[in-house]
Image: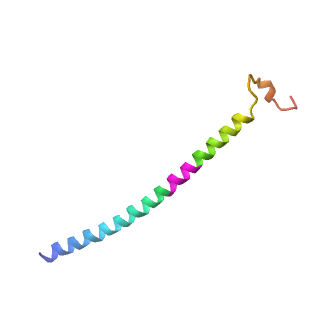
Amino acid sequence: MSADTDERLAQLEIKISYLEDLVDTLNTMVAKQHDQIARLAHEVGSLRQRQDESQAPGFRSLRDELPPHY
C-alpha cells in the first residue's frame, strides 16, 4: 500500500471511531428520553383518571364555572 492510501485508511478509522462514540452517546440519550416519556405518559394517565374521578357525573353548565364576582 502507498503512503497516501495508508493515510486515508487511518483517517477513515479515526472518523469511524468518532462516529461509533457519537452513536453510543445518542443511543444513551434516546434510551433516557424513552424512559422519561414513559414516566410522563403514566403521570398524565394518572392525572386524567384523578380528574375523571373528581368530576361530578352529568351535565355541567358554564355558569357553574363563573367566578363569584359575576
Q: Is residue 36 magenta?
A: yes
| 14 relative position to 37: left or right | left
- Looking at the rendered image, the quarter that the C terminus falls into is top right
The x, y position of residue 27, in whole percent, is 42, 59
| 61 relative position to 11: left or right | right
| 22 relative position to 53: left or right | left
Q: Residue extending furthest right?
A: 69
| 25 relative position to 1: left or right | right
The x, y position of residue 28, in whole percent, is 46, 61
Front one among 42 and 30 = 42
Dominant secondary structure of the residues highlighted in magenta in the image: helix
- The magenta segment is 32-39
- Looking at the rendered image, the quarter that the N terminus falls into is bottom left
Vertical order, 23 against 54 (above or below): below
Q: Is residue 37 magenta?
A: yes
Q: Quadrant of residue 9?
A: bottom left
The x, y position of residue 12, in whole percent, is 25, 68
Residue drawn at x 65%, y 43% as measured from the top left: 46
Q: Quadrant of residue 21?
A: bottom left
Residue drawn at x 12%, y 76% as measured from the top left: 2
Q: Residue extending furthest left?
A: 1
Vertical order, 56 against 47 (above or below): above
The x, y position of residue 22, in whole percent, is 39, 64
